[in-house]
Amino acid sequence: MTDRYRFEPSQSAPLEALPHKTEPSACEPAAPAPAARAPHLVIEAGRGSLWVGLRELWAHRELVYFLAWRDVKLRYKQTALGALWAVLQPFLMMVVFTVLFGRLAHVPSDGLPYPIFAFAGLVPWQFFNNAVGQSGTSLIGNSQLITKVYFPRMAIPGAAVGAALIDFAIASLILFAMMTWYGIAPGAGIAMLPPLIVLLAIFAGSVGMWMAGMNVKYRDIKYVLPFLLQLWMFATPVIYPANFVPAQWRWVLMLNPLTGIIGGLRSALLDKPFDWPAIAAGAGLTLGAAGFAVWSFRRMERFFADVI
Amino acid sequence: MPHARATAMQPIIRVENLSKRYRIGGGQEYYSLRESIVRTATAPVRIARALLTGSARANRAPDGERHIWALRDVSFDVMPGEVLGLIGRNGAGKSTLLKLLSRITEPTAGRAEIYGRVGSLLEVGTGFHAELTGRENIYLSGAILGMKRAEIQRKFDEIVAFAEVEQFVDTPVKHYSSGMHVRLGFSVAAHLEPEILLVDEVLAVGDAAFQKKCMGKMGDVARAGRTIIFVSHNMASIESLCSSCLLISSGRLEAQGEPAQIVMRYMASELRGHGGVRSLAGHQGRRGDSIPMLTSIRLVSSGDEPTGVVRMGVPLEATVEFSSPHPIRPILGITLKTADGMPLFGVSNRWTNQGVNNQRVSSGRVTCRFERLPLMPGTYLLDLYFGDFGDPSRDLDIIRDAISFEVAPADLLGTGILPRPTDGPVFWPATWNFG
């Protein structure tokens, strides 16, 4: 009885408007030949190698660009000073350290004026600091994306490093201005600048990516990270020269890739001799860290959407 | 597959025994580092104790960690150009299936092979940021959904026109109305051109005109020969859009076949037999973040006994019982819907302020009486929204499809004739004048 009166809104037009719904239309490319075709994509538990991950990230490089662009755009929105902050932070640190270490503690500075010596180290350090800090919390900050759409998750911490690079570029302008002020011109060593910056970005990305993945599961990372970065700065020859450390302990400094990279950047800019063993160690450790970070991130990213 | 012509063709999606297990442990899904260290450090003790007591629970978490299978051994094929509807109760595993196919999360077991580019549309406005302008959000959202920059550039004007936001392209979307926001979000997604499109219930947003436009767009996409998997609670759109249909129930594939048949089967299995009284304690339709306060619902018509069948034109009383952790002044909102999920009307004592000055109570009942149901014969559903006058803007407990009931025909017009079922679900008498 009730069936006869069942409300049937589906009897309206759209049904007829969709003819032959199960047949592909002629204008579409025909289905691949049945025999020799490999799946475009296989979904299974525990799949995905390191190389697949990197290849996918490369295919999504435009997305990395857009996410980085968004981060930069949003960071200085509603701030009075805007991008000036990128300059002010390392500059004020340089002033403080010049007074504390240069004037009061008489820390040596490789025969250079202490302010320029310190600033040439602080600008790349500040980049590392921002890149790691921002990428380390980036996944948590983008949880609404992770649960709603798929793209290589590495794009998120990667974009945070990209955004930090913009600040780095802005702060570098002040560094060049200071170099002009002090009458310091870079020599042929300036050619080392691009590879060293790439190394620094890769290392920052590796640390940031690993931290970001850990942060999804262990929210403690958020509290550990700032503290860790602060210690790390003092463990790196940023505001003191590497030869400030007694020779028999110099190897300990070399375990820190930043020793070679930041030291090398300073040499490239301020026309000082390079410490090649330190740079080689920095490059080797960076590649190792990058390999570990990608491997570990690929393992962790499987549960991001379930846990975040 | 029931399609004879499908044998010559290879499926574009092949799903084999796909399963997904979630851990449910007191709602906490992540550990703090301290807990992990403690768990690792105490593992030997737990194993030793397990060995001594002979229990096999050594690797279980101490807090009684439990698992649920959100999806279990689901297998099916999808042919190129097919529009597959996915139906089932809330929590049956439909969204989990879409999340697995779109690679948002990884299966626990089983596999799926996909022969084409996949685009998924699980929410409207993915990646939108309120501070950015419409233009900026189109690029951002487009990139996140998998479009190339050049592709977005090419389709930009089309996207803006479809969303009808031409004058506001350079306004931050935080100043948009919710309708504009939804339109722009859908418009970006609608211009994706993947070979396979996965769509969650996103069409249930926006005003009626825009919904119609969305459905039209989906129809276009389907006609262009693309493959669509489409989750909906709206049975009418499943029947009109889809060429085949899957019914999922408690994580398992219960039936597949012609949409009309599957929809019938779903409605028959899900909506019948509550007999006018239903416990709401473990209700499947409860919204995720709800506080389970409503404990039962009872429908009474003429007489004192609960009934699942109401005759046209007689009163209906819905009584809910609730118990709350703290005293409240209850607000009860009821939305009455057709069996296919289309809302017909809503009532709430919040709008009449009835009970606003009552004593606060931590348990009790609320009765809502409809004097005369203006409904045609058929099956209807009630959604419940439960709140507190202390914070009237917030719903504490929301239950979709809380209970169903049948309306039985009655000769209300005195002629033995009723309006045709195709005239709509509402029965409303009129008077006539001639002259």
Image: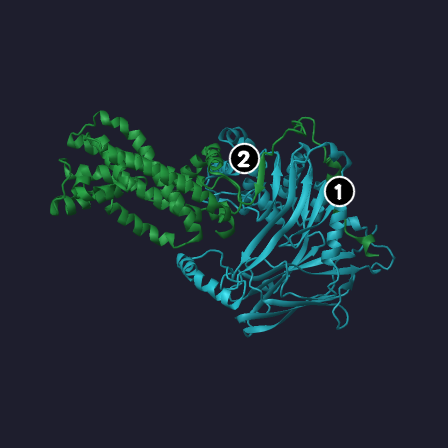
Q: Please say if B107 is above or below B359.
A: above
- Residue tagged 2: B160
The chain shown in cyan is which? B
- Residue tagged 1: A12
x and y, in percent, of residue A79 in the image: 33, 44
Q: Please say if B231 is above or below B372.
A: above
Residue nearest the viewer, comparing B312 with B35: B35
The chain shown in green is which? A
Hey, which residue is sitting farthest top in the picture? Answer: A188
CA distance for labels 2 and 1: 30 Å
Q: Is residue B165 visible?
A: yes
Residue nearest the viewer, comparing B435 with B226: B226
Label 1 near label 2: C-beta < 8 Å?
Answer: no
Give neighbour class at mark 2: few <14, some 14-19, many 20+ (Cα, 10 Å): many
Does label 1 lie on the same chain as label 2? no
x and y, in percent, of residue B418 in the image: 83, 54
Q: Please say if B280 is above or below B199.
A: below
x and y, in percent, of residue A182 in the image: 15, 32
Q: Amino acid at mark 2?
A: Val
